[in-house]
Image (cartoon, rainbow, N blue to C red):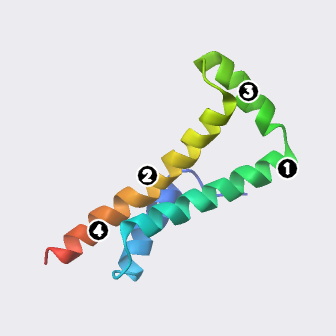
Amino acid sequence: MFLPWWSVALVGAAFAIFRPQASAWEAGAAAALGWGALLAIAAIQGPVGVLAGRLGVLFQVPGLVLLGFTVLFAALLGWAPAALILSSNRSR
């Protein structure tokens, strides 16, 4: 149904290629918003909160922190390739 998680990096790279005037932070923010939307959809359809709570017990952090880390991970996945491509384009 959805693309694999690493496709976030590909979309971040494509963002930088097709919008060279944009900043990498925009790609990261877009990735975080998209990932958050997918988490919200998953939470409506299933027990994401229960899973986050159980994993939180395992990692000894609140479940909400784990959900926040997933959104942060998506933001970094979107930002990193965009920053790399934009910095290499600007150095030319």
Q: Name the residue under label 4.
A: 85
56, above or below 74, in the image: above
**Amino acid type of the residue tagged 2 in the rendering:** Leu
At horizontal 73% and vertical 57% (from top left) the residue drawn is 1
| Crowd band around label 3 with a 10 angstrom C-alpha radius: few (<14), some (14–19), many (20+) | many
| Crowd band around label 1 with a 10 angstrom C-alpha radius: few (<14), some (14–19), many (20+) | few
Q: Mark 1 points at which residue?
A: 44
Q: Which mark is first along the chain, 2 or 1?
A: 1
Cβ atoms under marks 1 and 2 closer than 8 Å: no
Asked which secondary structure carries label 1, the reply is helix
At horizontal 83% and vertical 37% (from top left) the residue drawn is 47
Distance between the Cα atoms at labels 1 and 2? 25 Å
| Crowd band around label 2 with a 10 angstrom C-alpha radius: few (<14), some (14–19), many (20+) | many
Distance between the Cα atoms at labels 4 and 3? 37 Å
**Amino acid type of the residue tagged 3 in the rendering:** Gly
Distance between the Cα atoms at labels 2 and 3? 24 Å
Q: Is residue 46 left or right of residue 85?
A: right
Asked which secondary structure carries label 3, the reply is helix
Q: Which mark is first along the chain, 1 or 4?
A: 1
> Where does the image place residue 76, in percent across and percent down from the top left?
43, 51
> Where does the image place residue 91, in percent across and percent down from the top left?
14, 73
Cβ atoms under marks 2 and 4 closer than 8 Å: no
84, above or below 47, in the image: below
Q: Which mark is residue 76?
A: 2
Q: Which of marks 2 and 4 is in front?
A: 2
Q: Which mark is first along the chain, 4 or 2?
A: 2
Q: Pick the residue in front: 18 or 68.
A: 68
> Where does the image place residue 81, in percent across and percent down from the top left?
36, 60
**Amino acid type of the residue tagged 1 in the rendering:** Ile
**Amino acid type of the residue tagged 4 in the rendering:** Ile
Q: Which mark is residue 53?
A: 3
